[in-house]
Image (cartoon, helix red, strand yellow):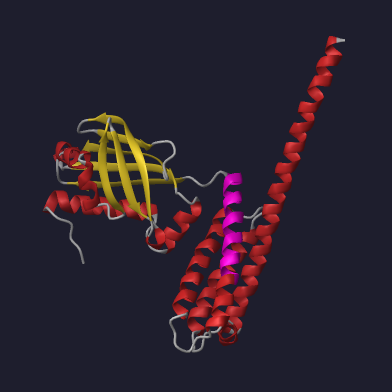
């Protein structure tokens, strides 16, 4: 009797679990279905931009010959669409490439409003339509990213500098020096108790802020940190200072793992605008070397 009662008690739990699995499977199916639909839409619109660029420009209210630009945009859309459709399951990275392309389209439509011969009413309708598709792309991409667990970004860069680990550690450990060579950092200041407050540049002229704490500090060897819970940026990182073989200066190694404030979309747009995370750190280390060896970062 006790065994029968236990089985009865277990039935509702099992039923709920199966129901949750069915719901998760249905959501996944819907996300993939929407993604494939957007993939076909991307290919169709891309073909229109390649085959009839002048007609499409007239339709959205832009006068003038922008055939080359529209054909280039069409090729990008077709590439994204094919990338979404070719796999067994839609790839979140290809979906995020659509979001990045949408951002560029919106920027170009905004610039078109300044053209004297543009039809602003048609441009407004086209902009609203693109904004709606952008929102759908972003939502679908975010859900696919969560399902695939691929929203984390990893960065690893290193550089050799003709200075001792002691000098490099001392300069880096003073966080107020970091904006001198990390151009994406607006400010960094210590707030006490191994904690610090950071402000960084983000796409579209915005900024993000977060608080971090040092998790390990070995003088002249290692500085490790992580962002605090509730910060705009979820980040873990470290910088190592190792003496180079043969007494030829030092090797500085930076490793980071983080999730952008807007998921992978932030990283995708940043990459399209020339501010990919890996490139940022690589350029920062290059400027760090110039400052430590020559006294200042060389600009062109």
Q: Which residue is located at x 40 percent, y 64 percent?
A: 273
Q: Which residue is located at x 32 percent, y 35 percent?
A: 224
Q: Determine if the magenta segment contains residue 153.
A: no
Residue 252 placement (x, y as % from top left): 25, 42
Q: Nearer the viewer, residue 86 or 58?
A: 58
Magenta span: helix, strand or loop, mainly? helix
Q: Nearer the viewer, residue 293 or 140?
A: 140
Q: Which residue is located at x 24 percent, y 53 percent?
A: 286
Considering every residue shown, the one lying at the far front of the view is 121
Residue 293 placement (x, y as % from top left): 13, 50
Side of 64 where 251 appears, left or right: left
Q: Nearer the viewer, residue 11 or 71?
A: 11
Considering every residue shown, the one lying at the far left of the view is 295
Magenta span covers which residues?
A: 129-148
| Quarter occupied by the N terminus | top right
Q: Determine if the magenta segment contains residue 147.
A: yes
């Amino acid at each position: 009797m006790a065994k029968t009662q236990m089985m009865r008690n277990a039935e509702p739990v099992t039923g709920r679990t199966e129901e949750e699995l069915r719901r998760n499977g249905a959501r996944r199916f819907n996300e993939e279905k929407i993604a494939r639909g957007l993939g076909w839409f991307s290919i169709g619109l891309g073909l229109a931009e390649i085959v009839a660029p002048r007609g499409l420009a007239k339709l959205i209210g832009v006068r003038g010959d922008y055939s080359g630009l529209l054909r280039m945009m069409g090729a990008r859309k077709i590439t994204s669409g094919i990338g979404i459709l070719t796999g067994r399951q839609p790839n979140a990275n290809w979906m995020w490439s659509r979001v990045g392309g949408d951002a560029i389209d919106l920027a170009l439509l905004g610039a078109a409003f300044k053209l004297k011969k543009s039809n602003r009413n048609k441009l407004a309708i086209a902009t609203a339509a693109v904004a709606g598709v952008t929102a759908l792309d972003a939502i679908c991409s975010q859900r696919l990213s969560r399902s695939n667990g691929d929203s984390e970004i990893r960065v690893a860069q290193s550089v050799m500098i003709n200075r001792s680990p002691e000098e490099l550690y001392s300069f880096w450990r003073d966080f107020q020096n970091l904006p001198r060579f990390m151009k994406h950092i607006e400010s960094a200041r210590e707030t006490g108790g191994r904690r610090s407050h950071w402000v960084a540049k983000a796409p579209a002229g915005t900024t993000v802020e977060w608080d971090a704490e040092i998790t390990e500090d070995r003088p002249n060897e290692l500085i490790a940190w992580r962002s605090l819970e509730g910060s705009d940026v979820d980040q873990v990182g470290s910088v190592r200072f190792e003496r180079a073989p043969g007494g030829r200066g030092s090797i500085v190694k930076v490793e980071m793992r983080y999730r952008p404030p807007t998921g992978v979309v932030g990283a995708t747009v940043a990459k399209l605008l020339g501010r990919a995370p890996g490139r940022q750190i690589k350029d920062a280390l290059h400027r760090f070397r110039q400052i430590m060896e020559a006294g200042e970062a060389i600009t062109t």
